[in-house]
């Protein structure tokens, strides 16, 4: 498609070309730091935005490039033909970092950070609340990852089968995310750089950590002690969970970070928090957050003074969760917020639904039970 440049991209019209059009049709210029920056920004902006990832038939790929020189069509075709290259953008930036104009990148990040701080001043998203199916004695907060919502993780709680736990799934506000080309997504903070352990928008991180502390304070005021509250999060939500944990002055029951990362705290955690249990779970084949970052995270938390940090790695798991990991999470929760057995009077006052949930949490099958008396007898036998 380089043999016959489109008339629109002649030297006379070069000033009107977008970066991607110039890259596709103009002859390659001599290497320079400015050119490297333009190519990198072009790849990120035009190839990493979800709304342009559309399928084109293979027979039309090159015809589209030569006969229909529209920027969005170039981006569609480029993203389809070079998906492996797109997935390696973080590695690409590490290689090109010495050639990037640092001053311009810093100004770009500062501009994005100011936009994120402005968005953080808006209302937080709606929280999904799942009341305990039995007698409530604990609360677990679960924070979602980038672009997700509380509703997106709301299937986790029922799957853990913990009738004494109330699950709360907060939702982050919509902010412009730099790594997504400025698209507004639900995010706890802006990510302006592929180096996850590097620079980030600290004001928005601080705002999210403050919001988490407010949620915990509200549950404490409602009657749940701090020793019966657990913070959990996936990916970006896990980062906020671990950052909040490292800044606590009073311990909670525990913290869980899945598929996440967190830099080592700048200050040692207070002595009162050092015994707080922390569960770090990570997929060994995670392509977005490499497992090496989970190892660094666990090591940094231990170095900061947290003594009960356990790291679990799961073979074959990517940037997600699976039954094995959630099974370990359930065991961790039963250890840090065990369900106190109900008294005989409480069992006799339960409904059939509550009795079934109690028996199910203890692994007792209710198949074939028809009368309430059968459920009650089995429950009374289980608590002896």
Image (cartoon, helix red, strand yellow):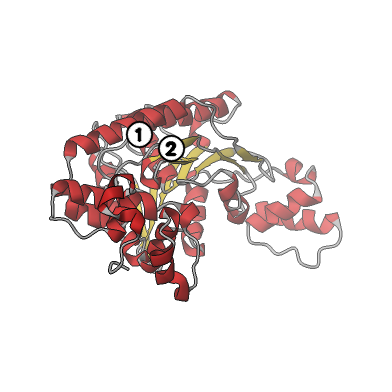
Tell me whether the residue at label 1 lies in contact with that at label 2, contact meaning CB atoms closer than 8 angstroms. yes
Q: Residue drawn 62% across and 54% down?
A: 161
Residue lying furthest right in this view? 371
Query: Looking at the rendering, which quadrant does residue 31 occupy?
Result: bottom left
- Secondary-structure class at tag 1: helix
Q: Residue drawn 34% across and 48% down?
A: 18
Give the spatial CA distance, label 1 vs label 2. 7 Å
In this rendering, is residue 321 above or below 16? below
In this rendering, is residue 337 above or below 8? above
- Secondary-structure class at tag 2: strand
Residue lying furthest bottom in this view? 59
| In-front residue for pair 122/228 | 122
Q: Residue drawn 50% across and 66% down?
A: 55
Image position, residue 53 (x, y; %): 47, 59
Bin the neighbour count of mark 2 within 10 Å (Cα to Cα): few under 14, some 14-19, many 20 and up: many
Q: Which residue is mark 2?
A: 176
Image position, residue 206 (x, y; %): 37, 29
Q: Which residue is mark 1?
A: 112
């Amino acid at each position: 498609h380089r043999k016959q440049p489109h008339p629109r991209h002649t030297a006379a019209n070069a000033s009107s070309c977008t970066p991607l059009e110039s890259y596709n049709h103009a002859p390659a210029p001599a290497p320079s730091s400015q050119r490297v920056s333009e190519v990198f920004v072009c790849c990120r902006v035009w190839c990493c935005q979800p709304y342009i990832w559309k399928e084109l038939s293979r027979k039309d790929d090159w015809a589209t490039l030569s006969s229909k020189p529209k920027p969005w069509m170039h981006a569609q075709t480029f993203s389809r033909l070079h998906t492996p290259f797109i997935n390696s953008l973080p590695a690409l930036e590490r290689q090109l970092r010495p050639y990037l104009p640092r001053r311009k990148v810093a100004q770009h990040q500062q501009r994005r950070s100011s936009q994120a701080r402005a968005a953080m001043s808006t209302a937080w998203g709606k929280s999904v609340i799942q009341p305990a199916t039995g007698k409530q004695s604990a609360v677990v907060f679960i924070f979602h990852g980038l672009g997700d919502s509380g509703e997106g993780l709301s299937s986790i709680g029922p799957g853990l089968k913990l009738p004494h736990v109330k699950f709360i799934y907060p939702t982050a506000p919509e902010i412009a995310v730099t790594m997504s080309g400025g698209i507004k997504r639900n995010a706890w903070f802006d990510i302006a750089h592929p180096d996850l352990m590097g620079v980030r928008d600290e004001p928005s991180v601080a705002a999210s950590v403050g919001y988490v502390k407010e949620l915990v304070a509200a549950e404490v005021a409602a009657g749940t002690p701090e020793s019966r509250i657990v913070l959990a999060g996936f990916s970006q939500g896990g980062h906020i969970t671990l950052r909040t944990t490292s800044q606590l002055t009073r311990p909670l029951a525990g913290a869980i970070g899945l598929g996440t990362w967190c830099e080592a705290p700048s200050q040692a955690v207070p002595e009162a928090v050092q015994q707080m249990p922390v569960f770090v779970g990570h997929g060994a084949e995670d392509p977005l957050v490499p497992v090496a970052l989970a190892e660094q995270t666990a090591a940094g938390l231990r170095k900061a003074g947290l003594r009960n940090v356990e790291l679990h790695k799961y073979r074959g798991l990517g940037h997600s969760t699976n039954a094995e990991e959630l099974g370990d999470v359930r065991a961790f929760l039963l250890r840090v917020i065990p369900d106190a057995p109900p008294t005989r009077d409480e069992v006799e006052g339960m409904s059939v639904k509550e009795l079934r949930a109690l028996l199910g949490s203890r692994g007792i099958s209710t198949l074939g039970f028809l009368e309430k008396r059968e459920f009650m007898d089995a429950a009374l036998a289980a608590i002896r």
